Image (tube, grey):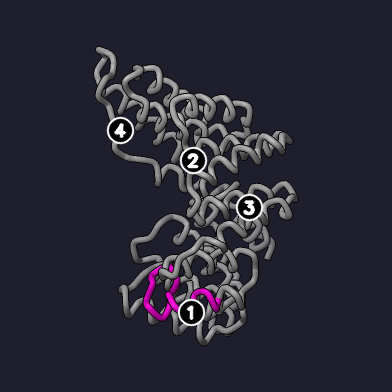
Amino acid sequence: MGTRFYKLAAVLSMCMLLAGCRDKGPSEVELARDEGISYMEQADYQNAITAFENAYSLCDEKMPETKTDISLYEAACQFKMGDFEGVKDTCSRILELAENVDAYYMRGAAFLKLGEAELAKADFDAASLLAPEDYGLFLDIYKQYEEQNQSAVGDEYLQKALNIPGEEMEDYYQKGSIYFYLGEYTKAQEMLAKPAEAKHKEAMMLMGEVYLALGDSVHARNVYQQYMEEYGEAAEAYNGIVLCELADGNYDAAISSAETGLALEADESTKRDLLYNEIVAYERKGDFATAKTVAAQFAELYPDDEEGKKEYDFLSTR
């Protein structure tokens, strides 16, 4: 699934237009929507869908933006559950209200999953026309085709992204991100050079990953250190340094950096990466007992993580 689905809850408007609810009052719509989001964050998608449908039913015809907002959440949950027919229906309901990039994209992805290639392309093209300079959209469309082993078709959308005009640092960063995803690290490095030098936050972080992918831990470490000099300590940068230390065989330094990063505020994805890399560092150091203890902690926190489960199972046999 493309990144657009993972980010949907974050990018959708958090401010609902609640005017025009039935006599039950706007608070019921908001409460039902928030309940759905809570279930969604817990990956309880069926209960989330029920809550979103309840919220939708409390809206009237004077609330098209609110209905769209709720329906996009519902469609994202349906996609997570593999209910692609449901995604089609929910997105069609949204598009009856007004054209919407996310609805076209999700319905296109559902069509593609169901083998309806022409309808999928029509929806992807419609989304592209509405957002002709959305790098993320084009990359996500490519990922959908890639998942279906149709990268050749998806290449068309990547070319659209790479052909977006613009000389801003963000343009260079976005194109560098695309080349990085494609594994074209030298091209990614060329694109990221200007924004990284200009201290573009995301470009600096990605440049560290590019250097690591090129086997250059020295320059990668320098980038992460420069990042923290510019923006302050950050768990994500410490994770990059952990990877540098692992690459260089400095396992005690890797463990120290991982623990420093874990003590900072961070999103769950970064915390997960830091904790996992700490397990790897203990394992490579030969301290299997501590590695197993940390792996048990990881498995408890992230029971659905397959790589973490494999590590724990492996360490349990040592």
- Mark 4 or mark 1, which has the lower sequence index? 4
Mark 4 or mark 3: which is in front? Answer: 3
Report the residue at 57% width, 51% height from top: 140
Residue 263 circle label? none
Amino acid at the residue labelled 1: Ala
Task: Check disc 3: other Cα within 10 Å, few if <14, some if 14-19, many if 20+.
Answer: many
From mark 1 to mark 3, how far is it between C-alphas? Answer: 25 Å
Report the residue at 28% width, 14% height from top: 22
Quadrant that contains the C terminus:
bottom right
In the rendered structure, the answer to whether residue 117 lies left or right of residue 73 reads right
Residue at label 4?
A: 16
Residue 193 circle label? 1
Quarter of the image for residue 288 reads: bottom right
Residue at label 3?
A: 142
Q: Range of the magenta residues?
A: 189-204
Task: Check disc 2: other Cα within 10 Å, few if <14, some if 14-19, many if 20+.
Answer: some
Helix, strand or loop status at disc 1: helix
Amino acid at the residue labelled 2: Val
In the rendered structure, the answer to whether residue 14 lies left or right of residue 43 reads left
Helix, strand or loop status at disc 4: loop
Mark 4 or mark 2: which is in front? Answer: 2
- Mark 4 or mark 2, which has the lower sequence index? 4
From mark 4 to mark 1, how far is it between C-alphas? Answer: 40 Å
Whether residue 31 is in magenta: the answer is no
